[in-house]
Image (cartoon, coloured by chain):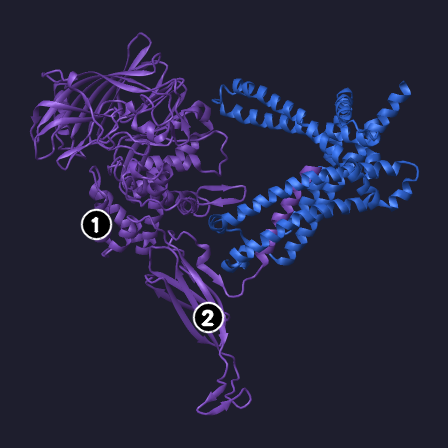
Amino acid sequence: MKVLTSYTKGIKEATKWPKMIVLLWAINFMFASVLYFLMSELFNSSVAPHIDVDQLMKKLDFSVILDFILNHGGALSTIISIGSILIIMYFIASHLIYGGIIHTLKSSREPGGEEKKSRFMTVFWEGAGKFFFRFLVLSILSLLLWIGFLFINIILTPIGGLLTNNGENEQMLVYVFIGRMIIAVFLILLIKMILDYARIKTVSEDNRNVLQSFIQAIGFVLSRFGKTLALFYLILLTGAILFFILFFLKSLISTTTLAAVIGAFIIGQFIIMIRTWTTIFFQSGQMQFYSASMRTHANKE
Amino acid sequence: MVKKSGLIILVLFFLSSYGYAALSKHIVDYRIKAKLLTEEKAVEGQETLTWLNDSSIPVSELQFHLYLNAFKNNRSTFMRESGGTHRGFELDEDEWGFIDIKSFKIKYGPDLTSTIEYIQPDDGNEEDRTVMRIVLPEPVPPDQRIILDIEFFAKLPRVFARSGFYDDFYMIAQWFPKIGVFQDGQWNCHQYHANSEFFADFGIFEVEITVPEEYIVGSTGKRIKESSGGDGIKTYTYYQEDVHDFAWTACPDFVEFKEKYTLDDPRVNTEIILLVHRSHLNLKERYLSSLKNGLEFYSRNYGAYPYETITLVDPPIKASGAGGMEYPTLFTTMGFSFLPEGIYLPEMVTIHEFGHGYWYGIVASNEFEEPWLDEGINSYSEAKAMAKYYGEEGSMINWAGIKLSDILLQRFQVAAVSKLDPILKKSWEFYSGGSYGVNSYQKASITLLTLENYLGEEVMAEVTRTYYDRWKFKHPKTQDFFDVAEEVSGEDLGWFFSQFFKSPDTLDYAVGTLSSREIKPPIGIFNGELKTEENGDSRDNKVYENEVTIVRKGELYFPQEILITFEDGQEIRETWDGKNRWVRYTYTKPQKLKSVQIDPDNRIILDIDHLNNYKVYKPKKDFSIKTALGCMFNFQNLLSLFSF
């Protein structure tokens, strides 16, 4: 029951913050637009003068792609390097984003929350700055969980070997590969969930001892394993359904003209907004669950 | 009745042995008894070899290949060159391979075992034991035979390079003492190199193979006898004439399928034998249909498949190092049970390796010295066969909306590999394994495709057919192919062959500059008179000076056709011999240029950059925007993963 309540309250709360959705989308857009300018510049100089655009808009020609990679691979790899740097920068910036989201959600629940809502930007960036280093330390602590992840994978390797008769049974090789992928995704999501609760705990209690928050988050998740998992996957499923509906709509557009390309791109931006909404939803839903669980715990005591 | 049939057999044997009814001249006649020792992972063999001195001079020594000694230690030439890897598969240092000669005798003559000497004709590496020499007590006179009795023990390596075992799978190739080729007054008997394949004389092979009875056996040639030893072993006898090698395989996990294959024009009647590993049974139909495609394509385009059997061997995944290899009337293919239908890897490997039955098996060029003659011509044939049976556009991959052709992938590999070697080079002298592979296979293939586009499909078909017909069951050299091409086409193709086969340079033409300048009426001082726009000549319609330059960026040249298109759709085709570094064309017209295209019919596949063959006067940015926005959206999704 607590799971469903947290889920529904989480949806309401996440939807209450359009400004936050737009802000998160804008940050994402800003980072990604660097890539757009680099790519369009490269294509304009290297490909555009040498192709029959009208033909290519209708049908992809792989020989153009291969010639482009062969003859402009150097420039492309520079862009890929820049993209990698952008990803690292965005990952670091995501610590600000989480701080902002959770702090904003927490503040809105406190007395005078409505007033704080009108000062959204101030509250968001206040939280972003306040918890940035704590969240960064949490990410470093999460390396312990990643070591566990690697350890499980190491254990799974000989088991896979046994099941596939050392790789000889090809059908089993495929099933084992799929199985290992499922386990890997499950573990990655589990680590993400633990980190979510560690961050929520850090902000809720304004705890400077992040190691304590981290350990308590692990305890919290493990002690309510079924419920935390159920809530997490409900949120994930909701986000995924919305994502795929919009993605399906986007794929219906035949991008053979510039207008259609721009139309598809705009729908694409709604998809990114859905993803930012889901990010907020993860925090709001799990915060609801965390608060409700803490209240129950306190009542019992 | 019995006496009569016995007489017929005797006559047939006589005829075949002495080359009268044969397709090839029988220089060698091997009779081998081989016993597979599954505990030792080895083969015990007794070989009786009859060798004919086909030359005009007496031969006082014999040279033999002992290929398995390439896997004897890490100091052999093969291991030094390869570093213990072959096509991505690695040597297992716990399972070396070697061949020991237990005894070497002239029949009814002296034992020469103690006189065996190892030689290293290619690199002088004294630790290489892949070629042995025997000095004979008396020379073999011209047109005379010598009969030798050889006993040997062949320990197989764990397979990573063609030959060896994995668990109970055995691919037994290059496994017996094989005599070299006495050619042009000397022995042609090269060491086993990382990047070399093989060369041998035609003849007769009769091999008795003894294996544990649960093993399924496949082999070069036709099974003529099988008998059970009663003690858990079975002996199969195989016989084949007009081949120059003999390989076999054994594995209890093979599932054997047999099917008759016939073709009316040309007349083909053969038995397809598939030995499919039980883990790949879902690939059986794919193997079968692609082998039938290969039989049809090669028979129709080059000549009827002449043998009574063709055996396809499908190794298990862990023995993939044995896959993708050709032997006479038998080849190994490659496939994985999880491969989607639209990824034509098993089909391509099957057609390619079957095709070697022609280009290596029948037209037996020297793979050591001129690898392009079999690999290049066969890759060219494979690309054409794949396009015919699996579609021009998606002949290699036609899956999940991706269509890639065999030819496109070949061209991509050629353009990607640096220009350090020409096609014509000894296999072990290439800069690297990659350079050997790309030059011998892909570059030779697309060079032939370019030649085909230059000469015309029909002329090229006649070239390959004539080359096959003239050189089947013989040992042609590169010049023989060139001679046939010139003879059939009636053209002097020296410029083509000397550039594209002998030079490592590249072919690349590009559209240089395009300009359309309006021609203004004359203004200024003319004959002491000032002409201005007001008092000068007036022109109602604008006229443009359109200028196009084409540049030769690569070192090699090729005659070019250039298509110039104007704004109103008018087209002009120019031809240029392509020899200078650049050419300029100028047109005075009331229209501006629209685009310029070199090689508008895409004939010159060898051009390493097709993108610069086309240029528009006013580029549109639509595609750049589309692609860049697509990249941006994907990148946005990727970024979202880090904060979802």
Chain A color in figure: blue
Q: Position of residue B500 (x, y in %)?
A: 31, 50
Q: In the image, is A282 to the left or to the right of A259? A: right
Question: Quick one: SS at disc 2?
Answer: loop
- Crowd rating for badge 1 (residues with CA inside 10 Å; few <14, some 14–19, many 20+): some
Image height check: is B544 above or below B350? Answer: below
Which of the two residues, A205 or B358, is positioned nearer the viewer here? Answer: A205
The disc, 1 or 2, on the residue closer to the chain's N-terminal end is 1
Quarter where residue B143 is shown? top left
Q: Residue A248 versus residue B638: which sits nearer the camera?
A: B638
Query: Which tag is nearer the camera, tag 1 or tag 2?
Result: 1
The reply to whether residue B465 is visible in this rendering is: yes
Residue B188 lies left or right of residue B635; in this view the side is: left
Give residue B106's position: percent from left, percent from top.
Answer: 12, 19
Q: Can you tell which mark lies on residue B570?
A: 2
A169 with respect to B234 (left or right): right
Q: Secondary structure at mark 1?
A: helix
Check the residue under mark 2 and report the chain it is in.
B
How far apart, in angstroms, are the residues tagged by discs 1 and 2? Answer: 42 Å
Q: Nearer the viewer, residue B79 or A290?
A: B79
Q: Image check: B104 left or right of A22? A: left
Return the mark for residue B483. Answer: 1
User: Label 1 amino acid?
Assistant: Asp
- Residue B556: horizontal and vertical position, in percent? 33, 55
Q: The disc numbered 1 marks a residue on which chain?
A: B
Q: Residue at x 62, y 42 (%)?
A: A85
The shade of chain B is purple
